[in-house]
Amino acid sequence: MSGLIGKKIGMTSVFSAEGKNIPCTVIEAGPCVVTQVKTPEKDGYAAVQLAYDEVSEKNTSNPLMGHFKKANTTPKRKLVEFTSFEKELNLGDVVTVDIFEDDDWVDVTGISKGKGFQGVVKRHGFGGVGGQTHGQHNRQRKPGSLGASSYPSRVFKGKRLPGRTGGDRVKVLNLRILKKLPENNLLLVKGSIPGAKGSYLIIED
């Protein structure tokens, strides 16, 4: 198992050998620098910490600056730990898209688009109270009766109600890499990937 940190660039489509037009997401994956190697003897578990996306020194705290100097690299914005890697890595090594191959299957984790406060129709797919019949004229998108009368005189926890929507950590499994472009650090991944353009992603195989 191995992985990379990346950034969502946008969507495009490519033609397969059979002539099918396949939609895909363009991900800038890496290059990532190994900034820490954890071992069971010292840390209690084995892991590799990767850093991605350069940031200026003035926007980096002093403790993190010392952390990056140990790895002999410039400050980075995003740090992610991977608990297992196929090949042995050392401090300061650079990991690129070359760890993946065309037609590999990967899992992609990201933060979904935030949609703010939403009602039950958009948040949970409710059908609303109904059309403008039965004497109703202004409640088409309301949740309707919640079923609580004299007992228990409250709304049960866990009811599907309006509230903040999106902005959650989402992991999409088994996505196929259609093509990798090592010269530009790009991966073309079939399907939709969580998050807005420019949001960070974790790609694991």
Image: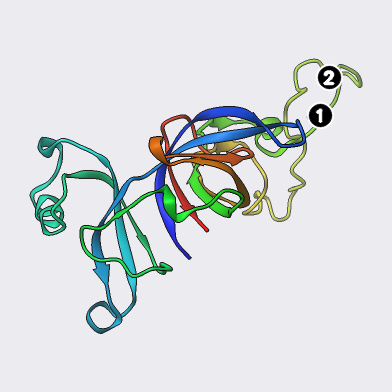
Between tags 1 and 2, which lies in front?
Answer: 1
Mark 2 neighbour class, 10 Å CA radius: few under 14, some 14 to 19, many 20 or more: few
Mark 1 neighbour class, 10 Å CA radius: few under 14, some 14 to 19, many 20 or more: some
State how far apart marks 1 and 2 are (Cα). 9 Å
Residue 52 % position (x, y): 30, 45
Q: Is residue 116 above or below residue 89?
A: above
Among the two numbered marks 1 and 2 on one chain, the one whose residue lies closer to the N terminus = 1
Q: Residue at x 39, y 37 (%)?
A: 183
Q: Residue at x 12, y 46 (%)?
A: 61
Query: Is disc 2 placed on a helix, strand or loop?
Result: loop
Given residues 165 and 44, the one toward you in this image is 44
Residue extending farthest to the right is 134
Residue marked by disc 2: 136
Given residues 44 and 2, the one toward you in this image is 2
35 displayed left or right of 31: left
Residue 82 % position (x, y): 39, 63
Disc 1 + disc 2, Cβ < 8 Å: yes
Residue marked by disc 1: 129
Amino acid type at circle 2 is Gln
Given residues 106 and 101, the one toward you in this image is 101
Q: Residue at x 30, y 60 (%)?
A: 49
